Image (cartoon, grey):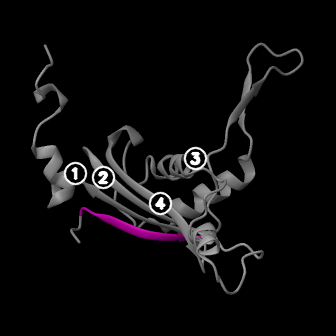
Amino acid sequence: MSDRECHFMAFGVPQSQGSMRAFLPKGGKFPVVVHQKSAALKSWREIVALAVPKGTLLDGPVAVTMEFYMPIPKSRPKFLHTEKQKLEWAWPAKKPDLDKLIRSILDALTGVVFHDDSQVVHLVSRKQYGNEPGVEVWVTPYDLLQGETRHWAQQGTQTDLPVEK
């Protein structure tokens, strides 16, 4: 791994970004915007930011990979006998939504690993069950990517595609 790359693991139950809601306080002129899960989300963002190795603020486009490890539900059977059970319990196909988990991490890394989450030009992520909940994150300057991940980008952009007449 290059000294320009960032890899870390943050432990804790991953929190989703959640939705925002706004309200106008009595006698107020400006609306107040709050996250529905503000306390848990703030704590989770702090855990993530503190897990980042010091001095890793990156410039330019970056690629981000995230592996979310969700807590195994207590209701999960100890033995999975049927294919249906194996499929049902293989992946956490329920809330929280993966896109909202991603947003919470990108927001936590803004100003810590990159200046703004608009620098993210390549993103790979998944959520799975894990014995220890948390998230594993890799952030790589896009120019360091090699192999197949980079191959599609070297082939050109949509503007290079033939136009149907």
- In-front residue for pair 85/137: 85
The span from disc 3 to disc 2 (Cα, nearest Å) is: 18 Å
Question: What residue appears at the point 68 percent right and 34 percent down from the top-left corner?
Answer: 20
Residue 16 versus residue 146 in the image, above or below: above
Residue 130 versus residue 48 in the image, above or below: below
Question: Mark 3 against mark 1, which lies toward the viewer?
Answer: 3
Mark 2 in CB contact with mark 1 (< 8 angstroms):
yes
Residue 63's disc is 2
Residue 65 versus residue 51 in the image, above or below: above
Report the amino acid beneath label 4.
Arg
Question: How many numbered discs?
Answer: 4
The span from disc 2 to disc 4 (Cα, nearest Å) is: 15 Å
Question: What residue appears at the point 67 percent right and 86 percent down from the top-left corner?
Answer: 79
Question: Mark 1 against mark 4, which lies toward the viewer?
Answer: 4
Residue 126's disc is 4
Q: Which region is colored magenta?
A: 4-11
Residue 116 versus residue 108 in the image, above or below: above
Q: Earlier in the sequence, mark 3 or mark 4?
A: 3
Q: Earlier in the sequence, mark 3 or mark 2?
A: 2
Report the amino acid beneath label 1.
Tyr
Mark 1 in CB contact with mark 4 (< 8 angstroms):
no
- In-front residue for pair 68/129: 129
